[in-house]
Amino acid sequence: MVWQVTWATVALAIAATVSTGVLAHVLPAAQDNWRRLEYRAFVWLSLGAIVWTATYATHLAATTGSAKYVLLDLTWVGIAIVTASWPVFAFSVTGSDVLTGWSILVLVAVPTVVAALALTNPVHGLVYADVVESDVAAGGFEFTPGPALVAFLAYSFAVNVATFVHLLRATLGAAGDARVRFALVCLAGVIPTAGGIAGAVASGGSPTVDYTPVCLALTSSMTGLAVTRYGLLDPVPVARETVVARMRDPVVVVGEDGRVLDSNDAADDRLGVGDDDLNRPASAVFADVPGVERALAGDECDRIELVGPDGDVRLFDVSVTALGTSEPTAGSGVRSENRVLVFRDVTDQRRIERRFEALIEGTSALIAVLDSEGTVTYASPAHEDVLGYDPDSLVGRSVFEFVHTEDREDMAGAFAEVTRDGESRTVQCRFRCADGSWRELSATGDDLLDDPFVEGVVVSSTDITVQKQAERRLQVLNRVLRHDLRNDMNVVDGYAGLLATTVREDPDRACEYADIIRQRARNLVDLGEKARTLDALVTDAETVTEVVDVVALIRSHCEQLRAEHPEVELTASLPESASVTAVPILGSAFDNLLENAVEHNDRERPTVDVSATVVRPSDTEEAAHVRVRIGDDGPPIPENDREVLRRGSETALEHASGLGLWLVSWIVSASGGTIEFDPVEPRGNVVTVRLPLYRPDGDAEAADDDKATTHATNDAGAGDVLGPSTDPTGE
């Protein structure tokens, strides 16, 4: 086949060559910045332009109808790529955040579908129909546009209009080189669009040559100029439009040669560094501020004082960030380093710091200053020690978001009274710590909003968590002991009287009464032991923990349970060992849980399942811990007892039936663990205890390999002993 060369094929070849050169120039930087959307979009845009111009050039150069038809179909690959990547590139390169994942998906999907329809057009004729060769030598076909082509042209027109409007706004809103960059991008899109429209109008709506890809020669030249001369994709321009221009802090960009390259509006308003200072040496611009020169030299820079255009002296923290540019240092071939200076105004912050430093330095009380809306404007250093918060992280946040929802209304009411009446108010509330736990605080607020040195409500808080816990536990202990001691002693007294009158007349009945008295006496002894344990927890404000092999502890209690209750079917699945940090009386918790599983079971042969698993950070988002589960097939734990544990309220516990669960809950809590009680369908309960895994060096867990587990089944009369098993699950 003979190929023909025309002015259009030459223009298309030039466009393809320029696009290839620009892509080759950008590709190394694109590999390093592939996560940036504007780089990815530019690479695809360049590839699309190359494919479109190359295939259309060969289409025009071909001299046979069949070859032209095939090559015309292939141009749709380039058309689809350009149509999809052009708006994405235009919006992303100007720093716009309008595009979302879904919008990008639509921008890619529409031209892809149309291109697929074009390649399969002979089957359905949706893109163009009635194709007739007009003049092969001239280079085209005549056809009737199909519905898919008409819809695609309308879609392309709408997308282009939206893109050009955005680029025009970005150009008008920019200054200096940024305006030139955006203007070049805008023209790069307008020229081929206008060329295509002009060609269609000039030919009466049926052009033999599509001028859109022909004009891509100018488009490629303009994008190449924007990239190579004006640094379109360089970090500094992108950062300037996406971040710097919108920052409230003053920002100044200094080149490797020490000259000011750029600044934002805040720098002009607050530092007096504007367009007149561009290309001036930074040392001259900041001649009266030696701290800036030290910061540029890489030295540590203390807070500096700067005089603004209005003569107001402000205090700033200066940070310097290096940004690589696309321009190599002369003669070295190495990228230069532009530096971004960010001036953070800390004048107001420092004024507040000085105002309260003398007042709260060294105090353990939590001192906070709130504005009239309850927003924190200052927090004392004690917040980090007591609650775990960096004081600076609290500033600017509402204090009410940290207050427990059940206490928030009372807290808000007290705050409103303080600001309305100007009188001090004290309120107790639960406050969320940084680790998610809760502390109980007694907070006193004083209205100093009108004080020019404070200008806020000063809240002084004291941590009363331990005190409140002790009060609640003592109230529970006192009430339960009074209730159950009175009930059991009434029973003992009553049956003792009956025993005295029936011991001679009815010895069998007397023995029955004696058994009842003996059982009540045992209940009182058991109640006394629980009370003693609870008293130890209540009175020890500073709980002491120790390292405990929880597996050995559970195994011991399982063996004890089997010996005392041979009728129980006990199954245990335990690792070889696992060390936790817990209070010394941790064994009382498991003793109570196992006893409850048996004593409250109404089956002749109760079933109890015990398992322990070491949960490591790699297995879960939780901290490393040992999870112990104790399940039974007895009736569910009474709702009122579970409600006591859920609410943590002493008023709900009225008798000793729930005292054992309270004992378990307190021991686990004092050990830094958690406990959950869940019913099992159709019958039974599961108690889950989580205890912190012991880490002797802060890195490696001290627990032995949890893959080696032990199992045992305690049937009535069975004589097997807990021992190693080959089950690898550890469950």
Image (tube, rainbow, N blue to C red):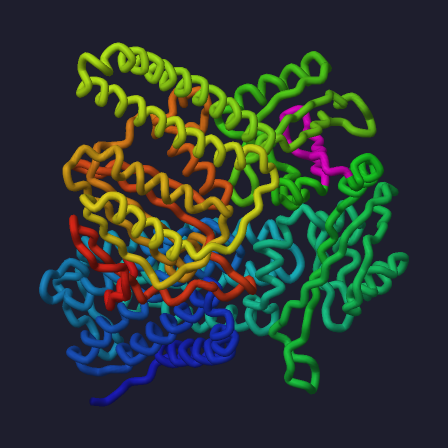
Which range of residues does the magenta coloring cover?
A: 363-380
Q: Is residue 612 left or right of residue 304?
A: left
Q: Residue at x 36, y 49 (%)?
A: 158
Q: Position of residue 326 (x, y in %)?
A: 60, 74
Q: Give the quarter of the image for residue 171.
A: bottom right
> In the picture shown, does residue 683 fall above or below 10?
above
Q: In the rendered structure, does residue 662 fall within the stretch colored magenta?
A: no
Front residue of 300 and 229: 300
In the rendered image, the residue lying farthest to the left is 123
Q: Quadrant of the C terminus?
A: bottom left
Front residue of 411 and 310: 411
Q: Quadrant of the N terminus?
A: bottom left
Q: Residue at x 66, y 34 (%)?
A: 376
Q: Is residue 204 visible?
A: no
Q: Is residue 560 visible?
A: yes
Front residue of 8 and 599: 599
Q: Give the quarter of the image for residue 160.
A: bottom left
> In the picture shown, does residue 581 fall above or below 668?
below
Q: Residue at x 64, y 33 (%)?
A: 463
Q: Position of residue 232 (x, y in %)?
A: 56, 66
